[in-house]
Amino acid sequence: MSAKAISEQTGKEFLYKYICTSSAIQNRFKYARVTPATDWARLTQDHPWLLSERLVVKPDQLIKRRGKLGLVGINLTLDQVKAWLKQRLGQETTIANAKGILKNFLIEPFVPHKQEEEFYVCIYAAREGDYVLFHHEGGVDVGDVDAKAQKLLVAVDEKLSESDVKKHLLQHAPADKKDILASFICGLFNLYEDLYFTYLEINPLVVTKDGVYILDLAAKIDATADYICKVKWGDVEFPPPFGREAYPEEAYIADLDAKSGASLKLTILNPKGRIWTMVAGGGASVVYSDTICDLGGVNELANYGEYSGAPSEQQTYDYAKTILSLMTREKHPEGKGDAGIVRAIKDYQGPLKEHEVRIFVRRGGPNYQEGLLLFLHLFSSTVSLVHRMWPLNFLLNTSSCSLTPAPSRTASFSESKPDGIAPAKKAKPTAPLGNPSPSICCSVLFSEEPSAVIWSLPRHAHVLVSVSVRLFCLLFHRGDHRQKFYWGHKEILIPVYKNMSDAMRKHPEVDVLINFASLRSAYDSTVETMNYPQIRTIAIIAEGIPEALTRKLIKAADKKGVTIIGPATVGGIKPGCFKIGNTGGMLDNILASKLYRPGSVAYVSRSGGMSNELNNIISRTTDGVYEGVAIGGDRYPGSTFMDHVLRYQDTPGVKMIVVLGEIGGTEEYKICRGIKEGRITKPVVCWCIGTCATMFSSEVQFGHAGACANQASETAVAKNKALKEAGVFVPRSFDELGEVIQSVYQDLVAKRVIEPAEEVPPPTVPMDYSWARELGLIRKPASFMTSICDERGQELIYAGMPITEVFKEEMGIGGVLGLLWFQRRLPRYACQFIEMCLMVTADHGPAVSGAHNTIVCARAGKDLVSSLTSGLLTIGDRFGGALDAAAKMFSKAFDSGIIPMEFVNKMKKEGKLIMGIGHRVKSINNPDMRVQILKDYVKQHFPATPLLDYALEVEKITTSKKPNLILNVDGFIGVAFVDVLRNCGSFTREEADEYIDIGALNGIFVLGRSMGFIGHYLDQKRLKQGLYRHPWDDISYVLPEHMTM
């Protein structure tokens, strides 16, 4: 959603801060906010003028005509304000059909003035520019300003001058106030543009001898411009319309939406409602709401919500979790219905069963088969009250089932598809169209052999389905190269360019741009592309481009004769020729909807998701789609319904036209006018979605930015009525759309306008490997196997334990090491022991071989990884690697049953060192405190230490011979680790021995000592030490005798 209403306080704050005018604006920042929690003593301390001035008090909750409703207290003292508020603050009030609580009020100074000093000013956005309205008589009785006010259009990219204001707007204004008003209106317009307002009304605007006073203000801003205006806006609060509470869940989803390139919308209509929806697609979500309301469920509808634009799995999970959390708070005696998501349903399966939830799933669109499989597996093991709908069923069926009892069913993929599909006509050669004019109404978007350049192709986007596309290239800001793509069964290389100029120069045939750039860069990249005259069509996929920027694109495109599809679109499709993005779904859906060859019906829709629905409906009821375009859900799409309807009118291959309009805007009325004027003669079938809006007590902004009626003529009901009166074929509901299309088509067949023929066999389309694997059609051995970690789901999992649980239970490094190395939750004493081992092995000074190598490498200018690797490569039996060897040697002796003395004698006889025994510096008289610390801990916490006891007996024997033959830290850790593995209760004897054999214990030293090596590296860099060269006097040069001379 783009245009969002802001409070009067916020609007005035913006105006007072940033307006630039020579007019003297009075009472700047003189307002005080009152809520039920207000401390009056603190309020008067912050705003001392409250005690000395006469006051005005009014609610600031997006309520229109407050004066006529008796909701403005005028010329009051502070005590009178308190008394006035006592009767209203926190009280439930009904305004029109909306019932709500008055809880936010604004107090301002009272401004004494005459009636002739009141004026009306309003600025609002339109496709062609911004309209400025002025009336010399303002106030509560201003009346119909559209009819009475002077109006001036400031076209896109044009400026408003004071002379224009005086000439066109101030004819009836008092002469002595014209200069002040002209300066103020120009400053107001500049503010309106700079801060991306879409609507700004001041009534009354009071001008006295002292200056200008802004008494009442209403405003909307373009919320998508947040990334541009954040510095000036700050954290803007968007209050809900009066009669609807602001729920924290709505704010949470709005925050998710703001942080995502996808669309996530949630409006809670009735938290105690029985029917909850979670629908993918801005258009489909409106159709579901329409259907539920048409069936009498308006009072049971709990929410309006939609998710679209390919949200991530985590975002979808968070959205679904929020819906399920809301719906399981209130228990309804008749149960509830919902369209949910697999992972969130798993998490909420307990509450869902408890509340007897029935879940209705209609899975269509891209990847629907994989999606249905997921639901099938889920429902077979969790929720039993589940009902499915085949993707070809109309949307209404799902909604109607949710309102009536139905037997339990689960998804079936062998269900037969509907019969009676109309055959296709024979392919005919396309008539030459000559040179297309710059006007879109007779231009061809995609020629029979289109050439395209694609800007920033996302990983999962699909672009082409035709064998006739001559050429295309990609644009990424990563340098020129070639990228691999499938072309049928083969893999081909597509050129990728860093600069648009290079791509245009090397590929002069390119005439289409598919722009997948983000909302922040889509504008600039589109403007750059329009500088190349060879480009005729541009599709802008991004959602959330500010309206002001979109209007600039439209103006530039009109000037250059370029057709824009979008923004906020999935694109379009010309069967057998060209396909943009995910239009038409996956290949199986393309085949099912016969999008591999042209039909006779062309359509235009705002919704991308519903364009796929139209593909489905048209393929079942006619000979198929000739061309389809989703113009996008923004208020000002780059091309309009009428643009494409006129183009279809002038296209010989199109025999009938389907339009799916929606609530908001007035574009559909142009179709009515075109029919009445005789410009459109081909049959037009049209339905405007959003009929449910008139049934709600408060205004609802649907998923598309343009799906909101600002006046009665913009409602879906009014537009459907006008279309029918103009001669358009209008169904009674969306569910009848297919029947009406089929009826019109059959009539054209009967009149021989369309000549059906036998169906052409579809082309052989190879199935993508990853897709076939998802469907379970193929299998192949994995290249890797892992059993310790899984990063694919909602959160990282270590050996079956989610990372959140790892932190919640404070497992620490030792616990994580137990999960990743041993796939077990080790006892807390074992985890602590591991951490102590890492601490005592972290470093042993710069002289040891590993640290020495690390230092030499660091001083040679090598990076951290290289220096660390150099040190780690020295670890072995002679340095640090004695842990494993000591563990194996002592375990073998202990397990064989030989006594310590016999073991020592045996090793001496064989001429072998006892690994883990001996130290260069430490001795029985100078003990290693690291060993002492570990020994004290082990003896206190380990349940049993048989191998350690054995090793200590060996130490007594060896130190009796030589005092430095102590059990060193490597040996101690090795034998103690064997004890913990064998006696902690988490391992079998075989498992414990296996971990010793595969070298797990040396990992402790490697991990611990890496900390020290990194420390040495950083130390050398910090000290800025130069290249190391070993001194000559520390080298003994021993040359062969014949070389000594």
Image (cartoon, rainbow, N blue to C red):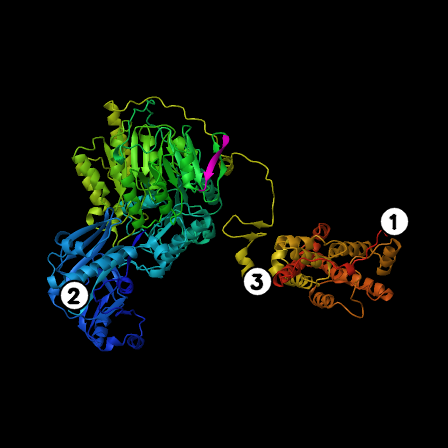
- Amino acid type of the residue tagged 2 in the rendering: Val
Asked if residue 113 lies in the magenta stretch, the reply is no
Q: Residue at x 40, y 28 (%)?
A: 468
Any part of residue 267 in sight: no
Residue 511 vs residue 918: left or right?
A: left
- Amino acid type of the residue tagged 3 in the rendering: Glu
| Residue at the disc numbered 2 | 207
| Residue at the disc numbered 1 | 1042
| Among the two numbered marks 1 and 2 on one chain, the one whose residue lies closer to the N terminus | 2
Q: Which residues are magenta?
A: 490-498
- Separation of marks 1 and 2 at Cα, in angstroms: 112 Å
Name the foreground residue: 735 vs 804. Answer: 804
In this view, the mark in front (2 or 3): 2
| Among the two numbered marks 2 and 3 on one chain, the one whose residue lies closer to the N terminus | 2
Please state the horizontal and vertical placement of residue 281, each as a whole percent of the image.
36, 44
- Tell me the tag on residue 810: 3
Judge whether 478 appears above or below 596 on screen. below
Any part of residue 58 in sight: yes
Kindly state the secondary structure of the residue where label 3 is placed.
loop
Name the foreground residue: 317 vs 711. Answer: 711
Name the foreground residue: 381 vs 961. Answer: 961
In this view, the mark in front (1 or 2): 1
